[in-house]
Every structure is written in C-alpha cells, then in structure tokens.
Image (spheres, rainbow, N blue to C red):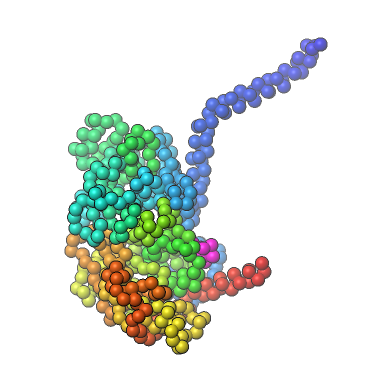
C-alpha cells in the first residue's frame, strides 16, 4: 500500500524524469536549428585553422650564408585543402560543391575575402574554381566578377569570331544560368548580366571558361528593382562585391552557393615589386624530391624569385613536408588544392592546367610585377650571369622595342635524358639533373612552339600554354626572346616527343645533338643555396628515420 510518505519521497524523482523528458522533446523540435548552428561553428573553427596558416610573414630574400633551418620560424606555406571559409565545403576528391546559402542566413560572410579556391559543381555541364573582381580600366565592358571554370564544350554554343582555336565567346542565353552579386551593405544580392568566354586550347569534353558577371547599369538595375523584390541594385556599379553566385535557371528560387571574389585592394597593399613562378597542377602522385629541390633552388638563388605557386592534385607527403620546411627560409610557397572534377584525360585537356595557370596569373596580379609560367622540368636560363627574372624580361622587351605588359616568350630547347644515355661521357650520377645532363638537341625551337613566358599579370586577360592569347590592351604583343638573352632548358625523357606544330614532325630523339654545359656557371650558387642545403639535410633525416623503422 502506497503511503503519503512514499509519495512525498517519489515526487522529486518523478519531477526530474518529467523535466528530462520535456528537455528531450524540445531538443528534438529544435534539431534542425541546432544542427545548423553546429555546422556554422564547425566551418568557422575550420576556417580559422586554415586562415592561421595563410597569415604568414614574408621572410628575407634567399641567401647562401647559412644552411641552418630554424624550426621556430614562421612557416610560410599556404595549404588550401579545407575549402571555403563559410557556407561552402568539399564533398570529396573530384566533386567539390558549395553548400547552399539562404539569403536570410548570412552570418559573418565578409570577415575575410581571401578564401581558398575549390572546384564546385554548378550543373553537370558547368564547374567553377575561383573568382576575381576585375576592374582594369582597359576592359571594354567595364568592371566584372570574373569566375574561372570549365563547361561542357559544344560547337553550336560558340559565337563565330577571331581567336586561337576554340577561343571564343559563348552565345548569350545558352548557359541556362544567371548570376547574382553579393555586397557587404545588404542581405539581398544584386542581379548581374552573365556572359561566358572559352579560353581553352584543346578540344575535349570540357573546356576552360571565364564566367563573367557584369553589374547591371543604373537604368537596368532600377528596372529589375521595379519588377522584383528579390534583387537589389543600390548603385551596384559603384561598389565592389565580395562574392558572386552562378544560378542554374531551374534553381532560381532555391538557396545559393557563393564564389568569393579576390579583390584588387587585397593584393595591392601587399605589392612588393617582386617576381613569382606559376607551375601547373602536380599529379602522379608527384614524389620527385630532387626535382622540386633543384627547381626552387635555381629560381630563388639564380633568378631571385621567392614566390612559388603550386596546384596540388597529388603531392607526395614527403614533398609536402619538404615544402613546409622550405617556407621557413623566407621562400613563399603557395599550395592550392586542385580537386579537379575529373581525372579522365579524355574529358579535360591536361587535367585543366590552363585554368590553373590563368588562376595563378590573376591571383598574382597587383602582388607581383613579373611572373614566369613554367613546368618543374623547365629552367629559364640567362646567357649572362647575374640577371634576375626581371632583368631578363626587361632585356627582351627592350631588344624588341616593346611595351611594358608585352609577354617575353623564352624559346625551348630539349635536354633529353636519352641523349646522355647514348654517350659514355655522362657526368657524375650524384649530380643534380640540371648539371648531369649536358647534351641537347642542336636546334632551338621557335617562339610560340613549346616556349614558356614571363608576363606582367595585370596585362593578361587569357593565358595559353606557350603564349598570351588575349591581352588587356590591344597594343600589347608576344615577343620571342633572342637566344643571346635567354633560353628555356627543358630536362625530360623525349621518347614520345615530336617536332613541328601539334607534334606532327620528326622525333626529337632523331635530331643532331650538341654538348652544352653552360648551366655549370650557376652550380656554385645553387649548391650553396639554403634551399638545396635543406634538401640534403631533409634526405639525411629521412634515411635515418627509415633505418630506425
């Protein structure tokens, strides 16, 4: 029989159970909101971690005075592997896509505009990688949000016009997309005018494409405002957007993904009148430590380049670790994640390398005065010792009576590995490859065939692999560098390399060869460089670790 005393004892327990039950019910009812908050918090904490790696100090110029690596120095390496700072995430390798953003849910979107780029799916026919606010006065149609990406190629989509191969404007209204521009002073985006321009050289399933979102003119914006409450003008032509959205026509009323724009003022303040090197995406997986070491050692110690941009499709962990140590020496290493939508070579020319190189040029604009666009096995070598990358550019342009902004095309010559193997006078096998292989083909290639270039980033609209296809100004040109100033030494196997346009000529390996040991004049500078000394130290430590294991 339950007594009154028993009831009084059980009452606190019953109340506690009821309170717990009420809490659980309320938690379940607010589950969606709590999940959303957790997602935002995760993105914010993740982005802060990435940002701390990106906020780095510029170290001193490369000097051979010391080979000691100070591990406590600021590590100057950008590992852009996490995704966008807010409201965007990576779904997996080869399938990046922005998380949907509700226009009413925009918390702290504008705290930092220098977001790590990532490939994002807009539709099955359209992917984007990065965005830039381009307000150069020389642009014929005015300031524009320039988004770099790829689209599925169809000949019927292209407008007839001039240009290299398929380089052409896309016909209006065939993308089945529109664009919105996001500004800091309003929660509502402004309607833009979307156009597309293909800059690709090779015809594959997908081609490199500029997606151009132009702010509406004042009259157009007012007309849009009077017809719709979902867009805002607020004199958008006079403001600078921080992001753009590319919207499929069948998703007009859904949430939007943001492509953050790198803006001019963010790079202008960091301008150091410096030189940089852009390298196309590294795949493989790329594990050539000695190749990476000699590349950075040469360009930093000989040509006085201390900024390097790499695109990581498949970097080996040892290479990544070595690069992080190189960054402690004051050599700025920028690694950008290349989660390209497909690794099928038949679908995407050279795994989208032309988009990466154009991204690099736009990324370095206003920050670097001169940029060399080369591969890791290519070395721009001056005839005279003591010339920097800037000196080479100025000498070429001066010789050609050119204008600042012209491109200097450095002519290619192959130092095929097979040339050395067919002779008995090869140098020491322990030498760096650039000193070990001293036989080259007799002829030097003409400019625009296999050549690489030194460019002024602000002067470039669309970059090709071997020359500039579109300049910002009509009076700018490509100039072939005289052999008396510089050549580009290309070290590689040449088994499948042919001469001629589109590699339709005879085999390179069938050509006459000559001995050329002129690279030796830079040997002392390279071997004494801290970058190479660090490599030797790194290898020794790895060997000791492997023995211990």
Q: Quadrant of the N terminus?
A: top right
x, y percent for residue 319: 51, 65
Residue 146 visible in the current orientation: no
Horizontal side of 228 relative to 360 (left or right) equals left
Q: What number of labels is visible?
A: 0
Residue at x-position 22% and y-position 47%: 171
In magenta segment, residue 27? no
Is 107 placed above or below 438 here? above
- Of residues 268 and 459, the one drawn nearer to the viewer in this rendering: 459
x, y percent for residue 304: 39, 72
Q: Which residues are magenta?
A: 315-323
In magenta segment, residue 316? yes
x, y percent for residue 56: 46, 59
> Where on the picture, by quarter, is residue 9?
top right
- Of residues 71 and 94, the one drawn nearer to the viewer in this rendering: 94
Horizontal side of 222 relative to 202 (left or right) equals left
Secondary structure mostly taken by the magenta-highlighted segment of the chain: helix
Q: Quadrant of the C terminus?
A: bottom right
x, y percent for residue 161: 18, 55
Residue at x-position 33% and y-position 56%: 204
Residue at x-position 28% and y-position 81%: 484
Is 283 placed above or below 247 here? below
- Of residues 55 and 216, the one drawn nearer to the viewer in this rendering: 216
Is 397 placed above or below 225 here? below
- Of residues 23 and 519, the one drawn nearer to the viewer in this rendering: 519
Horizontal side of 319 relative to 244 (left or right) equals right
Residue at x-position 37% and y-position 86%: 515
Residue 307 visible in the current orientation: yes
Work out which residue is located at the far right of the displayed protein and give it.
1
> Where on the picture, by quarter, is residue 241?
top left
């Amino acid at each position: 029989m339950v007594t009154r005393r028993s009831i009084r004892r059980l009452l606190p327990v019953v109340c506690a159970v009821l309170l717990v039950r009420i809490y659980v019910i309320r938690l379940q009812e607010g589950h969606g909101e709590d999940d959303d908050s957790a997602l935002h918090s995760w993105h914010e904490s993740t982005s802060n971690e990435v940002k701390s790696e990106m906020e780095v100090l510029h170290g001193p110029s490369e000097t051979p005075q010391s080979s000691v690596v100070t591990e406590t120095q600021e590590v100057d390496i950008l590992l852009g592997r996490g995704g966008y700072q807010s409201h965007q995430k990576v779904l997996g390798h080869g399938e990046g896509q922005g998380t949907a953003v509700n226009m009413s849910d925009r918390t702290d979107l504008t705290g930092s505009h220098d977001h790590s780029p990532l490939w994002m799916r807009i539709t099955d026919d359209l992917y984007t990688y990065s965005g830039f606010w381009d307000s150069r006065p020389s642009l014929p149609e005015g300031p524009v949000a320039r988004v770099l990406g790829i689209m599925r190629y169809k000949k019927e989509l292209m407008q007839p016009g001039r240009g290299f191969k398929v380089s052409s404007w896309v016909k209006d209204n065939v993308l089945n997309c529109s664009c919105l521009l996001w500004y800091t002073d309003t929660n509502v985006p402004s309607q833009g005018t979307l156009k597309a321009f293909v800059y690709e050289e090779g015809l594959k399933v997908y081609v490199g494409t500029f997606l151009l979102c132009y702010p509406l003119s004042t009259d157009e914006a007012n007309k849009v405002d009077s017809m719709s409450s979902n867009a805002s003008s607020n004199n958008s032509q006079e403001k600078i957007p921080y992001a753009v959205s590319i919207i499929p026509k069948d998703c007009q009323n859904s949430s939007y993904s943001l492509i953050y724009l790198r803006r001019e003022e963010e790079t202008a303040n960091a301008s150091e009148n410096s030189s940089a090197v852009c390298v196309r995406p590294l795949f493989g997986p790329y594990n050539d430590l000695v190749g990476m070491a000699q590349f950075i050692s040469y360009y930093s110690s000989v040509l006085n380049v201390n900024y390097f941009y790499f695109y990581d499709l498949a970097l080996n962990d040892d290479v990544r670790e070595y690069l992080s140590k190189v960054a402690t020496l004051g050599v700025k290493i920028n690694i950008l994640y290349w989660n390209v939508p497909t690794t099928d070579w038949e679908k995407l020319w050279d795994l989208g390398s032309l988009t990466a190189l154009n991204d690099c040029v736009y990324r370095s604009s206003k920050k670097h005065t001169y940029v060399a666009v080369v591969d890791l096995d290519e070395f721009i070598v001056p005839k005279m010792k003591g010339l920097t990358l800037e000196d080479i550019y100025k000498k070429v342009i001066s010789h050609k009576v050119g204008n600042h902004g012209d491109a200097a095309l450095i002519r290619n010559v192959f130092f095929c590995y097979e040339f050395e193997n067919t002779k008995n006078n090869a140098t020491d096998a322990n030498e760096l490859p650039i000193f070990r292989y001293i036989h080259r083909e007799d002829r030097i290639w003409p400019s625009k065939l296999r050549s690489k270039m030194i460019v002024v980033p602000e002067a470039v609209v669309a970059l090709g692999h071997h020359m500039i296809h579109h300049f910002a100004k009509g009076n700018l040109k490509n100039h072939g560098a005289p052999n008396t100033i510089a050549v580009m030494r290309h070290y590689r196997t040449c088994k499948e390399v042919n001469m001629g346009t589109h590699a339709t000529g005879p085999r390179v390996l069938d050509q006459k060869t000559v001995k050329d040991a002129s690279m030796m004049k830079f040997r002392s500078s390279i071997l004494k460089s801290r970058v190479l000394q660090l490599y030797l130290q790194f290898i020794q430590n790895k060997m000791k670790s492997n023995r211990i294991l």
